[in-house]
Image (cartoon, helix red, strand yellow):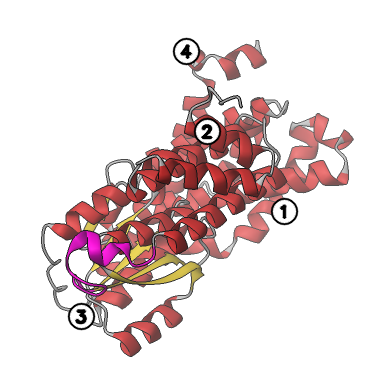
Amino acid sequence: MTHSTLSPQDLLWQAVSTGDEHAATSTVFDALEHGLPAQEVLLELIAPVQRRVGEEWAANRLTVAQEHAASAINDRAIAALSHRTAGAAGTAAGTGAAGKGRVVVACVDGEWHGLPARLLSEVLKLRGWTVDHLGAQVTTDHLIEHIHQTGPDLVALSSSIATRLPTAHAAITAVQATGTPVLVGGAAFGRHGQYAALLGADAWAPDAKAAADRLDQGPLKRPAQAHQPIDDLPHLDDQEYTMVARTKSRLVRTVMAGLEDRFPALRAYTPAQRGHTAEDVAHITDFLATALYTDDPELFTTFLTWTAEILTARGVPARSLIPALDILGEELKDFTRAAGMLARATDRLTQPHRGRLAREQA
């Protein structure tokens, strides 16, 4: 018999990237049987492989379908691990199945990246919490209904995409109005949790382990008096966010029409390529609206530089972003904050030391 020299992470990556669910589950179970604690299987084996899935998609080495398939296999591997370790949480924690309290874990409405929330749910179970895992894309109405029915000690909200921050803000304030504290996590809330603080969340954690550790330190304080989202963000009085968000469809149509002249290569695009371009413009508009909501120009600029890298990896010239930003700037010239954000993003993309875009334009 020969033994693989690959690490468990490499074996799991090989399994999920080739669509082999059986091999993925076997790798997870083997790691468990060789003494790796269940929490470490989740956080040191499955989580890094899932991050690699996203990185490989960004580098155009996985298709969207392959990325979805790999993520689905990781999710099923987590489910298999959960069944294998069922009952161990109470024994390990010495507290019984519901010893620490009840947590509702959910993704905000419109957030379909459900794996981070799933990882948190499983880690909390292993730590002795009773967990109601509601999954991806949970509407605020359904979340509040569940809170009234179950009376949890806290709600943990997950979001990976920054454009869901306005929705997350509404969910946070609605949950707090029930007297329930909210812990948030996920890439949407910023590398340092800056948007969690901005939106008034009661706590933030960068990952599942940090979230579980924070809850082990003691209960979160009950929220202060209920308030409205605009109380946290007085800059919304200028209505720029509202106007950009409401006119998104018109803005996308205007940009697509203008690109015919300013980016002639668009004329030769296939219908599918035009569709992808329209999606990119819609994402740009969404991120501009979110930057206006948070009053953070860097949120928009960071998204644009990331988008430039994604386009370049797919053989699409990143310089195509510039005329799109120019057209948006013309349409929004009377919106002071929006115009400033568009100008700042354009400057960032065209600075010579940014390299890639400058070489394209040379």
Q: CA distance from mark 2 to mark 3?
A: 38 Å
Tell me which amino acid carries mark 2: Trp
Name the residue tied to disc 2. Answer: 306
Tell me which amino acid carries mark 1: Arg
Give residue 2's position: percent from left, percent from top: 60, 24
Of discs 1 and 2, which sits in the foreground? 2
In the image, which disc is placed on residue 179? 3
Q: CA distance from mark 1 to mark 3?
A: 43 Å
For the C terminus, which image quadrant?
top right
Q: CA distance from mark 3 to mark 4?
A: 50 Å
Extreme-bottom residue of the structure = 149
- Decide whether residue 302 is among the magenta residues: no
217 relative position to 87: left or right: left
In the image, which disc is placed on residue 353? 4
Q: How many marks?
A: 4
Of discs 2 and 3, which sits in the foreground? 3
Q: CA distance from mark 1 to mark 2?
A: 23 Å
What stretch of residues is rendered in magenta? 86-101
Q: Are marks 4 and 2 in contact (CB under 8 Å)?
A: no
Tell me which amino acid carries mark 3: Gly
Few, some or many residues within 10 Å of mark 3 (<14, 14–19, 20+): some
Few, some or many residues within 10 Å of mark 1 (<14, 14–19, 20+): few
> Which residue is nearer to you in this view: 36 or 15?
36
